[in-house]
Every structure is written in C-alpha cells, then in structure tokens.
Amino acid sequence: SNNLFGLFAGYSNTGSYNNLFGLFAGYSNTGSYNEMFGYEAGRNLQATSSIIIGGEAFRGSSAFQAVNNVALGYKAGYAAQTGSDNNILLGYQAADNLTTGANNIVIGYDVDLAVATQDNTLNIGNLLFGTGIDGTGTTLSSGNIGIGTTSPYAKLSVAGNVVASYFIGTSTATSTFGGNLAINGTGTTTSNGGIDISTGCFAINGTCLSGGGASAFTGLTDTQGSLTANNIIFTNPG
C-alpha cells in the first residue's frame, strides 16, 4: 500500500501508506504515512507522519529516526539526526544545521537554528525569534518572543528602537525604564498611579522643575502640552 517512483525510492521501506518520489527518496524508511518528494529526500530517514519535499531535505548522514516533521525546501533539515521530531522547516536550506533539535519552527531563506540541538524555538528570517514554543491544541506556549534578539527575556523583547502612535497598558503593574523617558508631542499624558522619580529631576524642555528637597506637583502644563497626575514625588533635588 505504498506509491514508490524513482530509482531506489523506498528501497528498504517496510512501512505502509507512503508516497516516495525521486531518486533515493525514502530509501531507508521504515514508518508509515509519509510524503517524500525529491532527490534523496529523506534518504536516511525512518519516519512516521512526515512531509519532506525538496532535494536532500531531511537527508541525514546515516539511518536515523524522527517523526512528525514538515520540511519544505532544498536541504531543509539536511543534517537531522535521531530525535529531531515535530519540526516545521520552510525555505531553502532552512535549519540545515539541525541535528537533534525538536519542536522548532524555522522559516526563511538559508536561516538556521542558533543551536543545532535546541528545542521549542522559532526563527523567522533571522529577525523574529521565539523560545518556549511548547503549546499544543489550545494551550498557550510558555515562552517569549524577540525581535532582533535570539534570547528574549520577556514576553516581547526588542533589540532596538520601538516606534508607535501610542501605547496602551492593560495592567496596573509598575513599568520600569532603564534609561530616560522622553515624551514629545502636543497631547496629554495622564497617570492615575503617580510618578515617583528617585534620582534626577522632572523637566520640561530640558529645565528641571524641582527646586531643592522633596517637591510635589498635582498638575503641570506648558505650551506644548500638559501632564496630569495624582502626585509627582522628587527625592533628589538634582
């Protein structure tokens, strides 16, 4: 109950319900429900429920076992080894450095995993990265997303500037800024929780408004806009 087309396609196959097309395609296969198309596609792969399309995609250097993979593109997953299960690889040489890594998503032209053995990661075009990609069904993944960084430390980590028309916070948690906070524009900025400045000063157009010691303001306005808060506390007169 297999369809085999091509010299040595499915040569050692012992599985069922496979479609193996191309010279050496699925040569060593022992599993079932696989689709392998292309020259040496999955040549050394012993798989189940996998789709391998592209010359030398998921080829491996010797017989190995891996299941539930999707690899589309020339040499996608080329160096895969036993244990490289549940991967989705799309693109020319996508993750061709993959060895034993599992549950990864790699999309793009000639992009690789940061580490050949890593699990549960995302790489789209070497720009958008994810960790902890472990959700199944309707369960949310536990990891983080990074833009321009392969090791995001928060739900969204961005290496570089972020520009937006505005930001909306949906939590009462405290926001922390490692550097300075500059607000440019003619709109109104409102804080219902107060602003606590531990060092430096509150300034408008570069001019500090604190005049020494602790000072409190309930409203501030200049010609370019206004700031309204329940309380602003200065603990440093600088």
Image (tube, helix red, strand yellow):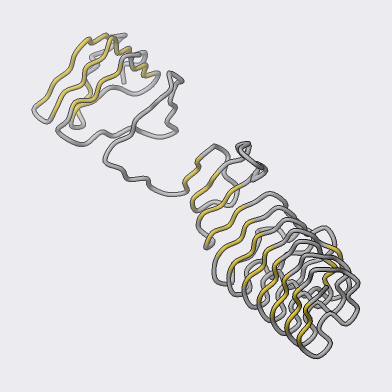
Instruction: Answer with the quarter of the image where residue 15 lies.
Output: bottom right
Quarter placement of the C terminus: top left
Residue drawn at point x = 34 percent, y = 30 percent: 168
Depth check, front residue: 173 or 39: 39
- Residue 108 vs residue 70: left or right? left
- Residue 165 vs residue 3: left or right? left
Depth check, front residue: 170 or 218: 170
Total tally of numbered discs in the picture: 0
Depth check, front residue: 195 or 114: 114
**Residue 224's x, y, as percent?**
12, 31
Reply above or below: 102 against 4.
above
- Residue 138 vs residue 161: left or right? right
**Residue 97's x, y, as percent?**
71, 68
Residue drawn at point x = 67 percent, y = 67 percent: 71
**Residue 214's x, y, as percent?**
31, 8
Quarter placement of the N terminus: bottom right
Reply above or below: 52 against 236.
below
- Residue 55 vs residue 198: left or right? right
Reply above or below: 130 against 71.
above
**Residue 231's x, y, as percent?**
29, 10
Instruction: Answer with the quarter of the image where residue 217 lies.
Output: top left
Residue drawn at point x = 80 percent, y = 73 percent: 60
Reply above or below: 21 against 143.
below
Among all residues in the image, which is located at the extreme left? 223
Among all residues in the image, which is located at the extreme bottom? 7
